[in-house]
């Protein structure tokens, strides 16, 4: 990413402040959180923190990282209002610079964002037995947002390949949530690190 990317994302949140409002967490996170042993989580490209807040409400210690300072500022305000600040460490960071070599997590999540190199880096932070959850958009002929960059979209079954050395707890493709702006196909994987 770059300064240009940071400006793009900050501008998006300023233009669409509804993205900063409280939203429900990922239904997949809620449904499959029971597979997670331990309470240390990393939320990559956390945005305004809908999943971060949910995890903190469930007594997780969360490192939440995003390039958009507007989103992180909003998340920090919401954490303070909910008295959850002590459970979350937020950081404005270009995810190209991500390096948490000394950290070990029980859960890593990346939602509505795709960076294949980042996934590989983040895998190294996951403890044996830890869970990696990815849900994001994929290439599909029915996608409403046809001008998306193909490099920002998963190919069919791509997450299975990325996590071929993990135990796959669940994988499926589905139509995105009704509150999203565009109708898009998504992929979900929940995978456990076994070695």
Image (cartoon, rainbow, N blue to C red):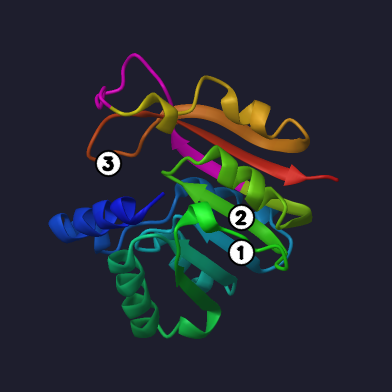
Find residue 38 and report its image quarter: bottom right
Q: Main secondary structure of the magenta part?
A: loop
Find the residue positioned furthest to the top.
Answer: 141
- Relative to 158, is 108 above or below? below
Estimate the spatial distance between the alpha carbons at disc 1 and disc 2, rounded to whole Å: 6 Å
In percent of width and height, residue 50 lies at 39, 61
Query: In the image, 31: left or right of 162?
Result: left
CB atoms of marks 1 and 3 within 8 Å: no
Q: Is residue 95 magenta?
A: no
> Which residues lie in the magenta part?
133-147
Residue in front for this viewpoint, 92 or 163? 92
Residue at 86%, 45% (x, y): give it.
195
Tell me the residue at 46%/81% (across/down): 84
Lower sequence index among marks 2 and 3? 2
Mark 1, residue position: 41
Q: Are marks 1 and 2 in contact (CB under 8 Å)?
A: yes
């Amino acid at each position: 990413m770059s300064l240009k990317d940071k400006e793009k994302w900050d501008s998006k949140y300023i233009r669409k402040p509804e993205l900063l409002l409280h939203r429900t967490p990922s239904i997949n996170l809620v449904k499959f959180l029971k597979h997670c042993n331990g309470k240390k989580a990393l939320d990559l490209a956390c945005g305004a923190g809908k999943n971060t807040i949910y995890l903190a409400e469930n007594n997780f210690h969360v490192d939440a990282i995003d390039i958009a300072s507007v989103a992180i500022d909003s998340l920090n305000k919401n954490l303070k209002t909910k008295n959850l600040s002590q459970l979350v460490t937020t950081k404005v960071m270009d995810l190209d610079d991500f390096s948490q070599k000394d950290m070990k997590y029980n859960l890593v999540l990346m939602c509505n964002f795709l960076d294949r190199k980042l996934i590989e880096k983040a895998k190294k932070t996951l403890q044996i037995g830890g869970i990696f959850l990815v849900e994001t958009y994929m290439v599909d002929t029915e996608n409403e947002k046809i001008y998306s960059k193909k490099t920002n979209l998963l190919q069919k079954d791509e997450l299975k390949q990325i996590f071929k050395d993990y135990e796959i707890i669940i994988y499926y493709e589905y139509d995105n949530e009704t509150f999203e702006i565009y109708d898009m196909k998504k992929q979900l994987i929940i995978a456990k690190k076994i070695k």
